[in-house]
Amino acid sequence: MDRRRRQPSPSPSRPASPDGAPPPPTTMRDRLDRSKPRQPVRAFLSLGSNLGDRRAYLRAALERLPDVAGVSNLYETDPVGGPPGQGAYLNCVVELRTALTPRELLAVAQAAEAAASRVRVERWGPRTLDVDVLLVGDEKVDEADLTVPHPRMWERGFVLVPLADLAPELVVGHLDSDIGRGVRRVGRLAPS
Ligand code: A4P
Ligand code: MG
């Protein structure tokens, strides 16, 4: 066999971009990261929807996610910020056990949003689907288009209450008595 012609097979856990190509490394940190195998870590994504068939958007997003290890309860939550009069959100948090980098997880999140035909009109405006990268092990990223841990997560009941379902030890010290206000449990995100 001519070994020079053999192509490495793609990693099964590496996400494809919407056109099917593997995402390019975009930072020096990513390139360095790829020189050695990454160990899987616990990562958490926040899912939210307040437009259209909210459950269906969340279910479809869940089905797209790689390396899923757990899903919180589902919560209906009052909108935080944004224009007045927008509808209530459905929110949940998904735990992954994954070797993907924070940037690869952002690509996964944005591909899921694109698949939900999300249209960006205004910040914190109504959306079919919002997927945020909350935590990736104990990694920290502070770049123009990616901040991990998510900078606003610790003050938000719609994030912390579902996160507490999966990892109560991570939210200790952040749950004050008001954090659950406007956050109502509405069961689970049942499979379709
Ligand atoms: N970005 C940077 N870091 C991250 C990260 N860790 N995860 C950048 C995801 N994205 C990250 O996000 C704007 C930019 O943030 C992206 O281009 C990405 O590169 P966006 O999703 O386009 O816009 P947005 O969501 O309107 O803005 P933002 O600031 O991300 O809003 P949040 O903080 O996500 O809040 N109320 C309830 N009840 N439930 C909700 O789910 N969500 C929001 C959005 C507001 N109010 C809500 C809810
Ligand atoms: Mg967002």
Image: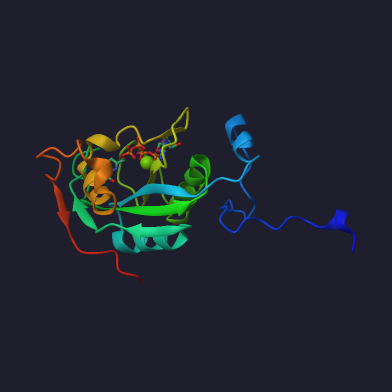
Closest to the observer, 139 or 186:
139
Residue 20 drawn above or below residue 153: below
> Where is ligand 2, by quadrant?
top left
Residue 59 position by quadrant = bottom left
Residue 50 position, x and y percent, is 27, 52
Residue at 29% x, 64% y: name it.
189
Residue 121 drawn above or below residue 113: above
* Quadrant, the N terminus: bottom right
Q: Residue furthest right?
A: 2
Q: How is the image coloured?
A: rainbow
Residue 113 drawn above or below residue 176: below
Residue 140 drawn above or below residue 47: above
Residue 130 position, x and y percent, is 36, 47
* Quadrant, the C terminus: bottom left
Closest to the observer, 95 or 112:
95
Left or right, 6 with respect to 60, comes to right
Left or right, 116 with respect to 152, comes to right
Residue 2 position, x and y percent, is 90, 60
Q: How many marks?
A: 0
Q: Residue furthest bottom?
A: 192
Residue at 32% x, 59% y: name it.
71
Residue 15 position, x and y percent, is 56, 53
